[in-house]
Amino acid sequence: MNREQTDLYGSLKKIFGFNQFKGLQEDVVNSVLNNKNTFVIMPTGGGKSLCYQLPALMKEGTAIVVSPLIALMKNQVDAIRGISENQGIAHVLNSSLNKSEIAQVKSDIEAGITKLLYVAPESLIKEEYAEFLRKQKISFVAIDEAHCISEWGHDFRPEYRNLKNIIKEIDNVPIIGLTATATEKVQEDILKTLGMTDANVFKASFNRPNLFYEVRPKTKDVEKDIIRFIKQRPGKSGIIYCLSRKKVEEIAQILQVNGINAVPYHAGLDAKTRVKHQDMFLMEDCEVVVATIAFGMGIDKPDVRFVIHHDIPKSLESYYQETGRAGRDGGEGYCLTFYSYKDIEKLEKFMANKPVAEQEVGHALLQEVVGYAETSMNRRKYLLHYFGEEFDEVHGEGANMDDNMRNPKKKHEAKDEVVTLLSVIRDTSE
Ligand code: ADP
Ligand code: MG
């Protein structure tokens, strides 16, 4: 190891307490330390934060971190402060601060104490902040959840589109973009919008070999199916996703009546109830949470053993994110989806009032969902292909971990074909 590498590992150990980098982290950190525009695509839980936190702490000046969720920013700032003696090492700049708090943030930045400054995109746009930051030594800008830039992502935020201009105005510093969304379209969009088609691109594998994927036809017995599935797994934790709040309440109640310890979670519940139900799930006071997509962002429960989609999601990105909450610890993670083409029509109908361009995107995304649900091929291969990744369905990790590979439909079909063939033979021989 040369001196720089020793420094890098020393800092990794001293600051984060880790002995090794995870996956591509070391290459990413080096790219940022070398002032290159850098683009990181890693699945959730891959360790993206360290990719900008470590270089920020090692470099001179303040790194600006753009992140869409205030709650996530607070968590990160608290974590960074926990490893330093000086609370000023990390700050959040947003609309919730009062005048004296803002003054404190500013003086810490001016004094060169602040290494990480977390900002919501809508705050960065504010002229008073931009003017202040223009005069400071900025090391680089990290854009977390960079897919928010793209309409092809699952979480488009219009404020993200203007970031490049603001960054240019503040200082022409390197940018590091990070996302867990792996589709080509989104990647291209991010690189173009951030004006960094020259970036070093680092893409980790999206394969989750311990997840089992199954898509089952959705019949009128779907609730019975779900109850049976859960009862076969006593004491195991799981999430059930539904499209509507009403469905969430309904399913939660049905489960409770059937002796399953389930709680509902959706944006229509008051904040106190939501926190309570989330905590119950995290603390194992209930086995199942029935939820809309409002549940899950930033929730890190390692031993979720199943994710059931009562209703199929509107894109494969969402499907991947939501099923990805199962088996974080590397243990069993069963992903069961109930599919009926009627649900696709329902999702199409929801889009009817949206602008035409948005409808077209939505329709294209839905077609991929249909393709995945109806395929008889290796589901992992299908999913990874969608994310631009080749998968070896013979030797790849988790190659037989789906319904199509375990019980090939082809067998039934093949049997049917034999029967038909036999009857044809019989017919013609008579
Ligand atoms: P992402 O943003 O990609 O979803 P995070 O940055 O939140 O992932 O990291 C996920 C988890 O991985 C965290 O608990 C973090 O502490 C852990 N982690 C990150 N890097 C390492 C490492 N080099 N060694 C061990 N654990 C790590
Ligand atoms: Mg992250």
Image (tube, rainbow, N blue to C red):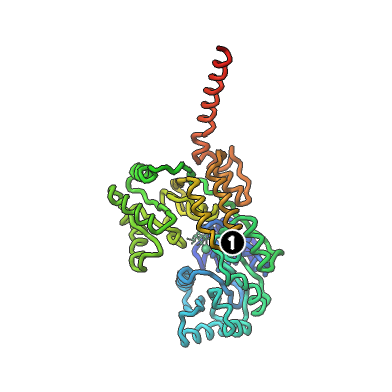
Residue in the image at 52% along x and 58% along y: 44
The quadrant of the picture occupied by the N terminus is: bottom right
Q: Amino acid at mark 1?
A: Glu
Q: Secondary structure at mark 1?
A: helix
Can residue 51 be seen in this snapshot? no
Looking at the image, which is closer to me, 348 or 117? 348
In screen coordinates, is 293 left or right of 422?
left
Of residues 49 and 404, the one nearer the viewer is: 404
The answer to whether residue 40 is seen in the rendering is: yes
Depicted 153 relative to depicted 390: above or below:
below
Q: Residues within 10 Å of mark 1 (few under 14, many from 20)?
A: some
Total numbered labels placed on residues in the image: 1
- For the point 37% across and 55% down, which residue is it? 289
Task: Tell me if residue 236 comes above or below residue 245 in the rendering.
Answer: above
Q: Which residue is mark 1?
A: 358
Residue 293 on image: x %, y %: 45, 59
Residue 96 x/y as whole percent:
46, 79
Q: Residue visible at 29% across and 51% down?
A: 256
Whether the residue carrying mark 1 lies under 8 Å from ligand 2 is answered with no
* Nearest to the observer: residue 23 or residue 369: 369
| Vertical comparison of 115 with 357: above or below | below
The C terminus lies in which quarter of the figure? Answer: top right
Question: Residue pushed farthest top?
Answer: 430
x and y, in percent, of residue 348 in the image: 53, 54
Residue 154 rendering spot, x and y as whole percentages:
55, 60
Which residue: 58% across, 70% down?
158
